[in-house]
Image (cartoon, helix red, strand yellow):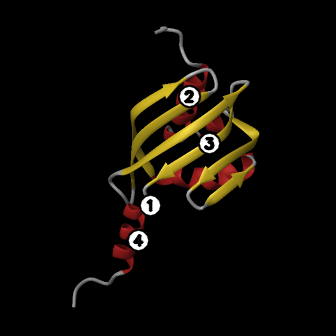
């Protein structure tokens, strides 16, 4: 076992700190221009499309807590829980590939059910 830091994990954590800290310009400095993101709704290609996908979520984010994070030279895996304006707990996980200090590939998994339930509750009239 080594105590040497993981380059991929350092980049992944810096990216995570930036976007969860509402500094999306800084977060994007860790993202490759030609990033490929595998998201639940399908692939997202390129930094502009990636920003368009992720930045709106950062606007509703109120807190984030890393549950676990591991990495090696080129790959990092993170699991975290987020608190957002509509949902108290929205866990997610990311597997990130890093090259030359930037994220080139990101596979994100998150539970959409709490957001769907919150939207349905918002649309359902109350009272009688």
Q: Residue 29's spot in the image, x, y percent?
A: 69, 33
How far is the residue under mark 3 from the one under mark 1?
Answer: 18 Å
Q: Which is more N-terminal, label 4 or label 3?
A: 3
Name the quarter where the C terminus is drawn.
bottom left
Report the side of 111 relative to 43 (left or right). left
Q: Residue 27's spot in the image, x, y percent?
A: 62, 37
Res 119 label: 4
Residue lying at 75% horizontally and 48% vertically, measured from the top left: 46
| Quadrant of the rendered image containing residue 88 | bottom left
Q: Secondary structure at mark 3?
A: strand
Q: Which residue is mark 1?
A: 112
Res 14 label: 2
Above or below, comparing residue 81 to residue 97 in the picture: below
Residue lying at 56% horizontally and 28% vertically, measured from the top left: 14
| Quadrant of the rendered image containing residue 81 | top left
Residue lying at 67% horizontally and 40% vertically, measured from the top left: 105
* Label 3 packing within 10 angstroms: few (<14), some (14-19), many (20+): many
How far is the residue under mark 3 from the one under mark 4?
Answer: 27 Å
Q: Which is more N-terminal, label 1 or label 3?
A: 3
Res 106 label: 3
How far is the residue under mark 2 from the one under mark 3?
Answer: 14 Å
């Amino acid at each position: 076992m080594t105590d040497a830091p993981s380059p991929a994990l350092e980049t992944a954590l810096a990216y995570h700190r930036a976007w969860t800290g509402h500094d999306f310009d800084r977060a994007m400095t860790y993202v490759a221009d030609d990033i490929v993101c595998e998201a639940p709704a399908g692939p997202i290609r390129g930094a502009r499309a990636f920003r368009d996908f992720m930045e709106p979520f950062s606007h509703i984010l109120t807190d984030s807590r890393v549950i676990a994070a591991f990495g090696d030279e080129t790959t990092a895996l993170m699991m975290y829980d987020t608190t957002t304006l509509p949902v108290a707990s929205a866990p997610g996980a990311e597997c990130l590939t890093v090259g030359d200090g930037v994220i080139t590939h990101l596979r994100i998994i998150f539970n959409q059910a709490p957001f769907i339930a919150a939207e349905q509750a918002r649309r359902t009239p109350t009272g009688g």
